[in-house]
Image (cartoon, grey):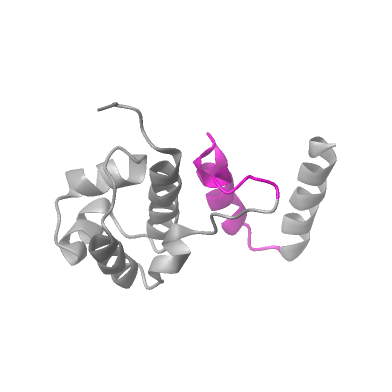
Amino acid sequence: MTDAVDPVDVAIGTRIRSRREELRITQAQLAAGAGVTFQQIQKYERGVNRVSAARLLQIAAVLKTTGAALLGELDGEHGDELALAAPGVSELLSAFRAIDDADKRDALLLVARGLRN
């Protein structure tokens, strides 16, 4: 058996963490609601441990979302279905969500689009 972390598990964990942070729920609060320890939530969020379907639905309920939303789309148009697992993406998304001014969000998108070319 390999010790390699599966990128799909990392992507799911990243979505869990992102939603948890968006709702400003601690790992301990999520763990209590899902019936696991906060250490287990840490492992799920890092993709070290695979989340069972039943547990994913429990976590989704606590996070006021769906299991499908946490699973994400695995058939991305350009093969970038694991983009949330890339370093810095979660922090960038959190920072973007924290920008209240629509003009500033639009400006940031313009800069990002310019940098990708």
Q: Residue at x 70, y 47 (%)?
A: 78
Q: Which one is in front, 68 or 86?
A: 68
Q: Quadrant of residue 79?
A: top right
Q: Nearer the viewer, residue 50 or 108?
A: 50
Q: Could you tell me residue 75's position as x and y percent?
A: 59, 55
Q: Could you tell whether 76 is left or right of 63 in the image? A: right
Where residue 100 sits: x, y (%)? Answer: 64, 63
Q: Quick check: is 63 in the magenta stretch?
A: no
The outermost residue toward the front is: 1
Is 116 displayed left or right of 1 in the figure?
right
Look at the image and say whether residue 87 sits in the magenta stretch: yes
- Is 25 situated above or below 6? below
Please give the range of residues in magenta: 78-101
Residue 114 at x, y percent in the picture: 84, 41
Q: Is residue 79 left or right of residue 46?
A: right
Q: How many marks?
A: 0
The residue lying at 25 percent from left, 28 percent from top is: 1
Which image quadrant: the C terminus?
top right
Residue 97, position in %: x, y? Answer: 58, 58
Q: Residue at x 25, y 68 (%)?
A: 58
Q: Residue at x 51, y 45 (%)?
A: 90
